[in-house]
């Protein structure tokens, strides 16, 4: 029941140790365990130990229990969001911690001696079993209900569909696992060796289920929570308020998740733990969600760049229009100066020449003015002709 880095770390790759057992670099413990002595719970269930895993988003509680005469109904009472089972679990925690309102997930382990066990209680009445080759294996029913955490009275799977045992993982000749969204069941495929009759693999399997595979479920829950947190942040984005800082934060969150949690090959002593973790990821469609987030962030980045380019293009066009307006204003001023120059220069030359060569008189003024006007007209005609030839309006 020891749940720390020293006891379990050798079975898992170091890359997931901080997530499962606390940050070694920070010197922070993140995992605690203790034996629990309490009165029997609802339906005769007994508790053996409890663990706590402190995470960035909350505390995960693991309660080790021994189910009683009707394991399926006992488990359903404990995983239900409300009822005597939930109240009993809350009482184990004491007043300092409160349980989340959602369903609990379960790791279960079923062993049997002698002949195969019968069907889970209540199933024959709820779903009469076919006989012969059409009959479904008894252990499949046990595996499904112990992974789902519901009773036959509440739900019966579609056994005619192709996927009701799609999450099965064959671990060895002696046992197999079934991974569903709400839990993982481990079911013995061979009978347990009676006590005192020789080595019993299922005794070791009990230890594996209650330690290593509990850690696998915890790691899967951490992956599920962290990835959905990033997905929710992306879904809450306001496209109109999108900027480089927001994109950088989302990319950083996804990268931190990928480096710290997003692993599927985590075992150092065999592939069974990794296979169960991959099964959990597939049940929750985490790989597809991760790929969608990568694509979404890529699309958002491309959109932001396109919007930035469009804004820069709009600024460039505005600057060009401003420069064009300034150029037009400058040309108008130049044209006005040119017109004034063409009007005044000929008159100035004529008046000056007339004043030099003759005595001032009204007749001289009239003649000089006429000559100046003629020169102005000739200058204007010449300017228009040359401007037209040069293409300058």
Image (tube, rainbow, N blue to C red):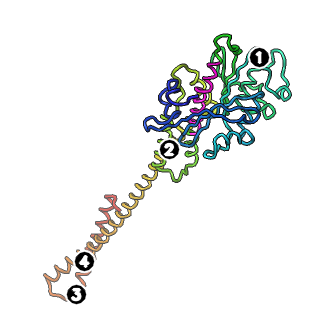
Residue contact at pointers 3 and 2, CB within 8 angstroms:
no
Q: Position of residue 108 (x, y in %)?
A: 68, 27
Prevalent SS, magenta region: helix
Q: Residue furthest bottom?
A: 361
Q: Is residue 360 above or below residue 252?
A: below
Residue contact at pointers 1 and 3, CB within 8 angstroms:
no
Q: Which callout, 1 or 3, points at the residue further toward the start of the chain?
A: 1
User: 391 or 134, which is in the foreground?
Assistant: 134
Q: Which callout, 3 or 4, points at the residue further toward the start of the chain?
A: 3
- Secondary structure at badge 4 equals helix
Label annotation for residue 372: 4
Quarter occupied by the N terminus: top right
- The residues bearing labels 1 and 3 have C-alpha atoms spaced at a distance of 140 Å
Q: Which callout, 1 or 4, points at the residue further toward the start of the chain?
A: 1
Q: Which callout, 4 or 2, points at the residue further toward the start of the chain?
A: 2
| Tag 1 residue | 116
Q: Position of residue 60 (x, y in %)?
A: 59, 38
Residue contact at pointers 2 and 1, CB within 8 angstroms:
no
| Tag 2 residue | 250
| Tag 3 residue | 363
- The residues bearing labels 4 and 2 have C-alpha atoms spaced at a distance of 79 Å
Residue contact at pointers 1 and 4, CB within 8 angstroms:
no
- Secondary structure at badge 1 equals loop
The magenta segment is: 203-225
């Amino acid at each position: 029941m020891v749940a720390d880095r020293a006891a379990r770390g050798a079975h898992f790759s170091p890359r997931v140790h901080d997530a499962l057992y606390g940050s070694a670099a920070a010197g922070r413990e993140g995992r605690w365990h203790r034996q629990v002595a309490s009165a029997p719970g609802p339906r005769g269930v007994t508790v053996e130990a409890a663990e706590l895993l402190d995470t960035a988003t909350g505390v995960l509680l693991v309660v080790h229990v021994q189910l009683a005469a009707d394991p399926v109904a006992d488990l359903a009472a404990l995983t239900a969001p409300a009822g005597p089972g939930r109240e009993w679990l809350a009482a184990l925690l004491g007043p300092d911690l409160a349980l989340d309102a959602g369903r609990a997930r379960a790791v279960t382990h079923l062993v049997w001696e002698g002949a195969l066990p019968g069907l889970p209680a209540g199933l024959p009445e709820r779903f009469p079993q076919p006989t012969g080759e059409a009959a479904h294996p008894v252990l499949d029913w046990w595996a499904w209900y112990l992974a789902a955490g519901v009773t036959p009275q509440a739900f019966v799977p579609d056994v005619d569909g192709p996927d009701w045992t799609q999450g099965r993982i064959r671990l060895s000749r002696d046992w197999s696992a079934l991974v569903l969204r709400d839990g993982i069941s481990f079911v013995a495929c061979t009978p347990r060796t009676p006590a005192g009759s020789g080595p019993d693999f299922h005794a070791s399997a009990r230890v594996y289920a209650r330690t290593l595979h509990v850690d696998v479920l915890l790691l899967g829950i951490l992956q599920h929570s962290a990835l959905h947190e990033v997905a929710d942040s992306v879904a809450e984005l306001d496209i109109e308020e999108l900027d480089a800082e927001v994109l950088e934060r989302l990319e950083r969150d996804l990268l931190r998740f990928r480096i710290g949690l997003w692993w599927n090959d985590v075992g150092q002593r065999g592939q069974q733990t990794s296979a169960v973790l991959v099964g959990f990821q597939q049940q929750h469609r985490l790989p597809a969600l991760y790929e969608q987030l990568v694509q979404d962030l890529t699309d958002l980045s491309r959109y932001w760049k396109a919007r930035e380019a469009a804004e820069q293009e709009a600024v460039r066009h505005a600057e060009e229009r401003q420069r064009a307006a300034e150029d037009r204003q400058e040309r108008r001023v130049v044209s006005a100066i040119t017109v004034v120059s063409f009007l005044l220069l000929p008159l100035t030359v004529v008046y000056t020449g007339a004043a030099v060569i003759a005595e001032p008189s009204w007749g001289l003024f009239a003649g000089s003015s006429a000559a100046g006007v003629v020169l102005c007209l000739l200058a204007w005609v010449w300017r228009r002709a040359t401007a037209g030839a040069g293409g300058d309006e």
